[in-house]
Image (spheres, rainbow, N blue to C red):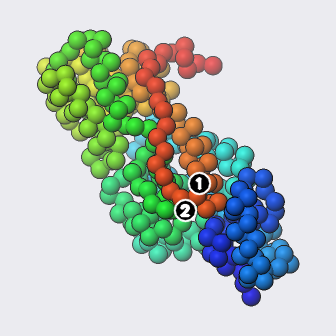
Amino acid sequence: MASIRDVAQKAGVAISTVSKVLNQYPNVSEETKAKVNEAIRELNFTPNTIASALSSKQAGRVALLLNLNTQTQAIDEIDMQYISGAINKAQEMKLDVITVFFSMIKDRDVYGIVNYLRAQSIEGIIIYGMSREDKILHKLIEEQHFRIVVVDAPFVNPNTSSVQIDHEKAQYDVAKKTILENKGNKILYIAGKKNGFVTKDRLDGMKRLAEEEKLSLLVRQGDFSEKKARQLAFQYARSRDIVVCASDLMAIGAMRALQEMDIFRPVCGFDGITLMGYAGKQMNTVRQDFYRISAEAMEEMARLLEGGEGREILLDYSIIRMQYLDIIC
């Protein structure tokens, strides 16, 4: 006897899409409805057969796969914005969502991850915080076991979409604004984690600016750590004109070090987290709307589950000087 999975495979869509067609959800294209209904007819699949399967809320679930930073609570804001954006959009689109953390699957191979997720009726995965070293996840994406949306990673295939801002251009823009405003030439650039996808993009933007403006660029790895950026500022900032940081946390660390040294150097950050408003000094930063990024990722996931093909999505950003009055409520 044919199953709902057989219908989905025959129609070339996800199980959740078959469920939506049978339950007459409004956000399904006429073309997709026709493919599903044709598959049902060809397989002689009757409504009575699928009733029990469709009554479960497990069909068509989406997993939010997050890489939590266990060393500091200061960046919880970003993960919470990701979770909130995804869940609210999922509710709007009638998708069921669960949260999974990297630590829960770190000891599994690809097939272990596949079995773990399929046992929970997962059809799609949104991945946040993946690095170049997460080879198992890279393989999972390449083998296309699920519909996948990656945030801040350059993976695109028929079943996978990428959602992010243009990190190279954003780093270029915020650094150029800071440098032109302060007329500096010797730049200390505190980069993120060496294995990060966004780290390379942001560093490329900084190198492009240095070449265009004939800057003296000193690059040091800060690992997105406030503490490490503080140490690097103590070590190198005195001999530099401006400090450019690849995250707001590192910018705060660098600024605190400068205050302790009792010297002034312009500092800029990247991300636009609320904590920046409490830093005591106004600094230029790139504001990413993490809530919106995640909502867009969930909307893209719904499109993939309905049979859409993977693509790259670039969202906008803004250059701001975050103030205390901007964040209090």
Residue depicted at x 38% and y 18%: 283
Question: Given the image, on which type of amino acid does mark 1 rest?
Answer: Met
Question: Given the image, on which type of amino acid does mark 2 rest?
Answer: Arg
Residue depicted at x 33% and y 36%: 168
Q: Is residue 284 above or below residue 308?
A: above
The crowd level at tag 1 (other Cα within 10 Å; few <14, some 14-19, many 20+) is: many
- Which of the two labelled residues, at mark 2 and mark 1, occupies the earlier sequence position? 2
Q: Name which quarter of the figure residue 249 lies in.
A: top left
The quarter of the picture where the C terminus appears is top right
Q: CA distance from mark 2 to mark 1?
A: 7 Å
Residue 18 placement, left or right of 164: right
User: Measured from the top left, where is residue 184 in percent x and y?
Assistant: 20, 15
User: Measured from the top left, where is residue 96 in percent x and y?
Assistant: 69, 57
Q: Is residue 271 above or below residue 178?
A: below
- The answer to whether the residues at label 2 and label 1 have Cβ atoms under 8 Å apart is yes
Q: Is residue 229 above or below residue 119?
A: above
Residue depicted at x 30% and y 24%: 175
User: Measured from the top left, where is residue 88 in percent x and y?
Assistant: 67, 43
Residue on which disc 1 sits: 301
Residue 222 placement, left or right of 311: left
Residue depicted at x 64% and y 60%: 306
Mark 2 lies on a secondary structure that is strand
Q: Is residue 44 above or below residue 134?
A: below
Per the rendering, the mark at residue 214 is: none
Residue on which disc 2 sits: 147
Q: Nearer the viewer, residue 115 or 103?
A: 115
Q: Is residue 254 visible?
A: no
Q: Is residue 97 visible?
A: yes
Mark 1 lies on a secondary structure that is helix
Count the marks: how many?
A: 2
